[in-house]
Amino acid sequence: MNRFPRSAYVHIPFCHRRCFYCDFAVIPMGDNIQPINGIGSNTVKEYLHFLHKEILSIKHKSPLSTIYLGGGTPSILDPQQIRELINLFRDNYGIDYGAEITMEVDPASFNEDELYGFISAGINRFSLGVQSFNNHILKNAGRRHSREDSEKSCSWLKKTYDLGLIKSWSLDLIQNLPLSGFSKWQEDLKKTLIYAPPHLSIYDLSIENGTVFKKLSDIGKLELPSEDESLKNSELTSQILKGSGYSRYEISNYSFPGHQSRHNRVYWKGLGWWSFGQGSTSSPWGEKLTRPRRSKDYKKWVINQSENSLDSSLVNKNFFYKELDEQIMLGMRLKEGIDIIKLFNEQNWEIKKSENNFNKLLNEWKKFLDSGLLIKRGDRFFLRDPEGLELSNQILISMFKWWNKVN
């Protein structure tokens, strides 16, 4: 089956400083960066030149229904630079009427005038990286902004949404950061609800190799909430947000009706997407391709793609379905879960083999089904909220064990 990608992710790697938990492909530029003229502007302009070149290198283009500018901190850029990026897609791919165009922004990286500039440039949805409203927690995580910066940013975004100038906005928090016990997490949630963001992303802290937190953890100097505290935080999150009208539609994401992230659902549904910029990963027709993480290597790669030949994964072809285990893993993140039989049918297995593999998977999942953490309705499986969603890793590990046996 041939499906033209309708979504594009664009990576803007610039940030003021690298946070202590971050292992993304970013370029720290310091606090005084001036993206048009001044400190760091040549670095920004050179990167954008190659980014534009990569975007234009694609031969099989079709109109986009979602665009997501992530980072890094895209709000480091000037509104005019954002406008040029969006116009590049509009002029060369086309942008659907009603498209969702999201931009990640960090408190203290933009002012109210710049926010209106981003909206004028074409952004209609923002994702604000607050992470915490507690100044001690923010400082301990290497964040640059303060609670006061977040409060200003939230007020500006709420105002533009209430005025109908944007379609939606999202607020990001990180659960179980160092110093974030039950009471402080409760305060963060209550503060968040004052601004009633239509969408919330709440991520569990993950300790990644090469980060400051990983180094501190290795020498025993990273104090994190206990497992009991973490579970208590998760239960509190589910209870408070459900009671405030939010629906948990994915393991880490909550929204009011009509405000789910259309772009992120493309990933979770296993559909195709374009991706541009250093360190980013595309999968337009099912096969993944990750670009070089270092600027120097990325620029060489773009020149090669533009002047010689595109990577085979970027050329129009029949859609290549992901491995079954990855499809199950992505689908189980969603509130609606997955239709297992439908996925099995797409494997083109003989009926007997399909039945045997299905029964083996049921055996692996029996204890989770019996306990109610995993729910089966017809051919569809989904995780119970919140207990099953919180223990999703255990359920997925059992699925991977099954896949290793049958594959």
Image (cartoon, grey):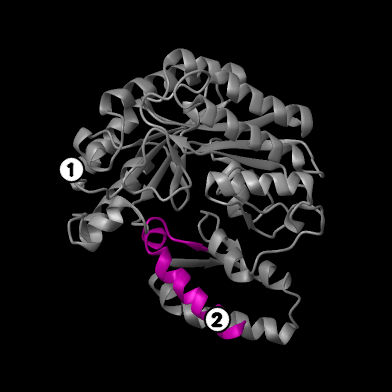
Can residue 372 be seen here? no
Asked if disc 2 and disc 1 are in contact, CB closer than 8 Å, the reply is no
Q: Residue furthest top?
A: 113
Task: Give yes or no for residue 248 being in the magenta stretch.
Answer: no
Q: Position of residue 8 (x, y in %)?
A: 65, 41
- Answer with left or right where residue 176 lies relative to residue 265: left
Which residue is found at the position 50% from the left and 31% from the top? 74
7 over 74 or under it: above or below: below
Type of amino acid at the residue the image marks with label 1: Ser
Give whichever of 378, 351 is nearer the camera: 351
Task: Give yes or no for residue 403 being in the magenta stretch.
Answer: yes
Residues rendered magenta in the picture: 382-407
Type of amino acid at the residue the image marks with label 2: Asn
Q: Quadrant of residue 325?
A: bottom right
22 over 189 or under it: above or below: below
Q: Main secondary structure of the magenta part?
A: helix
Q: Quadrant of residue 66?
A: top right
Image quadrant where one finds the N terminus: bottom right
* Tag of residue 404: 2
- Answer with left or right where residue 359 lies relative to residue 242: right
Which residue is found at the position 41% from the left and 56% from the top? 385
Q: Position of residue 165 (x, y in %)?
A: 55, 17
Q: Position of residue 128 (x, y in %)?
A: 43, 32
Residue placed under numbered mark 1 in the picture: 183
Give whichever of 196, 144 is nearer the camera: 144
Q: SS class of the residue under badge 2?
A: helix
